[in-house]
Amino acid sequence: MQQERLVAEVNAFMNQQERRILAQDIDKQDANMAVSDSRFGMNPQTHRRSFVRSIAGGTLATMAAGATADVDPRKVLLYESTRKEFREAIESGALKAVIVPTGSTEQHNEHLAMINDTASVTLVAQKAALLLYPKVMVATPVPVGISPHWMERKGTLTLKKETFLAVVFEICESLQAHGVKNILILNGHGGNVAPLRESAPKFASKLGIRIETNSYWDAYTPEIVKKYMASGKAPGHAAEFETSFAMAAFPERIHWEGVDYDKIKSRLNIKDPQSAIQEEEFAREAKLATAAKGEAMIEISVQWTAGRLRQLCDA
C-alpha cells in the first residue's frame, strides 16, 4: 500500500501542467541537441547547462508551499549547520526526520567523476528536504560504498560490507542519541542496496527508532523509464541515465575531452569478458544523454523521496 500511494503521488505530479510542459520541452531540446562531438556524439558546451539555473523559476523552486524559494539550500544540511541550529531544531520539535545519504567513490567510465553516486543521492536528498523544510535535514553522506566489482578499474574505493554497515549504523546511532526519531537511509549506489535492505530493520530494532531505506531510483516505474530513457534503462552505470543526471545537476563533473573509448579499451585490462562488453554498452548509451532528461528524472525522484519522508514522519 505504501508503494502504491507513492506511485499515485508521482503519477499525479507527472500529470500536472508543469510536467506536460517539461515533456514537450524535452522533445524540443532533444531535437535541438543534435550537434555532434567527433567521438561521443555530443557537444559538451551545448549540454553543460546549470541545473540550478535552469530550475530557478520552475517547478522545484515553487513546490514547497512557498517555503523552498526563500530557504537557503544549506539550511537543510546538518553538516552546514551550527550546533545551536541543530539543537533548536530538535528541541522545538520542528525536525522530524534526517536523511542519511549513501553513495560510492568508484569509476564511472571515462567521462563521469568518481563521486557521481554520492553527489547524485545527496542532491536528491537536499532537494527533497527543502520541499519539507524545516521538518527534514540531510546528514553527512557516506562517500564510499561496497564496490569490489569495480576494483579492476583504477581509482575505485571500496569498503567491506561489515565496515560500510558499521559506519551507517553508527551515524544512525549518533542521530538517535541526539533525539532523532525517524531516519531515511537514501542510497545512491547499487552495491549498497541489498546490505542496507537487510540491515535497516535490524538498525531500527536495536536503536528503538524508525529507520527505513530506499534508493533514489526506486521512484522510477517502468513507465517512467520508458518515457524518458531511450535506452529503456535506469539507473544503469555511467550510461544514459547517470550521464543525463550529471548533465542537469553538475555538468562540471563531466569530462568528454580526450575520450576515445575504442583507443583506450585495450589498456583497461578488464579480465571478465562480460564486464568488458557491458562497459562498451554503457559507453554507447551515454551518447543518448541530455540535460533535459536528467532534469525530468531528478524532479520525479525528489518528489517521490519527499513522499517517502512524509510517510516516515506521519507513521
Image: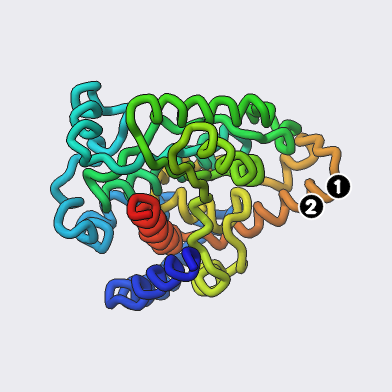
Residue at x-position 45% and y-position 33%:
141
Q: Amino acid at mark 1?
A: Pro
Q: Is residue 281 left or right of residue 247?
A: right
Label total for image: 2
- Asked if residue 307 is positioned above or below residue 259 in the image, the reply reads below
- Find disc 1 in the rendering and name its residue: 273
- Asked if residue 262 is positioned above or below residue 163 in the image, the reply reads below
Q: Secondary structure at mark 1?
A: helix
Q: Residues within 10 Å of mark 1 (few under 14, many from 20)?
A: few
x, y percent for residue 265: 75, 42
Q: Is residue 183 left or right of residue 151?
A: left
Asked whether the viewer can see residue 259, the reply is no
x, y percent for residue 92: 18, 35
**Considering depth in this image, is 90 or 249 the residue closer to the camera?**
90
x, y percent for residue 241: 54, 57
**Considering depth in this image, is 137 or 148 the residue closer to the camera?**
137
Residue extending furthest top?
Answer: 83
x, y percent for residue 146: 65, 34
Look at the image and tell me in which quarter the C terminus lies: bottom left
| Residue 65: quadrant of the picture | bottom left
Q: Amino acid at mark 2?
A: Ile
User: Looking at the image, what colour scheme do you see?
Assistant: rainbow
Q: Secondary structure at mark 2?
A: helix
Residue at x-position 67% and y-position 27%:
162
Q: Are marks 1 and 2 in contact (CB under 8 Å)?
A: yes
Residue at x-position 31% and y-position 46%:
129
- Find disc 2 in the rendering and name its residue: 277
Asked whether the viewer can see residue 180, the reply is yes
Measured in 3D between alpha carbons, the distance from the residue under mark 1 to the one under mark 2, in whole angstroms, is 6 Å
Q: Is residue 15 left or right of residue 119?
A: left
Residue at x-position 63% and y-position 27%:
157
- Asked if residue 165 is positioned above or below residue 49 in the image, the reply reads above
